[in-house]
Image: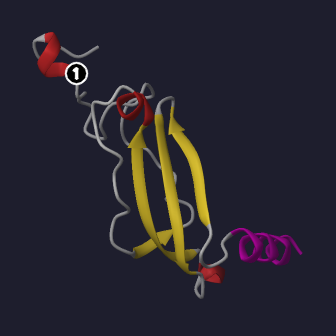
Amino acid sequence: MFKAIQRWFRKRRFREGKTLTRFIARDVRRDIQIISAVRIEEGIIAGRVRTTNVLYLSSGLVPEPEFEPARELRVEEMWRWTGKSWGGLPDGTSIVNPFRGGKSD
């Protein structure tokens, strides 16, 4: 029963052409544009990802990024953030480090 409800919910949520948006850190927003959801029952979609640090974007430090090329994404992993909770870059560095002498928090 649970699997049937989960399957219905996923088919409704992950429709082709739809763009999903979620904050994955305090100042990092990820947009996922659904290209194909034919394998949604397996937990896999084809989509294009765009990850934006909105603080940097609003301050004019970085331009609006484009979507990445389409690739397969696992539903369980598509919102995973590997950086710090305050945002920054996925490798733990920050765009402002050169201005602060290379120091990080």
Work out which quarter of the rendered image holds the C terminus and state it.
top left
Vertical position of residue 27 compared to residue 38: above or below? above
Vertical position of residue 76 compared to residue 1: above or below? above
Q: Residue at x 25, y 39 (%)?
A: 91
Give how far across and how far down residue 27 sits, in percent.
47, 31
- In the picture provided, is 81 more to the left or to the right than 6? left
Give how far across and how far down residue 82 sits, in percent.
37, 42
Q: Residue at x 38, y 75 (%)?
A: 70
Q: Residue at x 40, y 49 (%)?
A: 51
Q: Which amino acid type is shown beneath numbered disc 1?
A: Val
State which quadrant residue 55 falls in.
Answer: top left
State which quadrant residue 62 falls in.
Answer: top left
Q: Which residue is mark 1?
A: 96
Q: Is residue 60 magenta?
A: no
State which quadrant residue 103 falls in.
Answer: top left
Give how far across and how far down residue 78 sits, in percent.
50, 59
Work out which quarter of the rendered image holds the N terminus and state it.
bottom right
The magenta segment is 1-13
Mostly what secondary structure, the magenta segment? helix
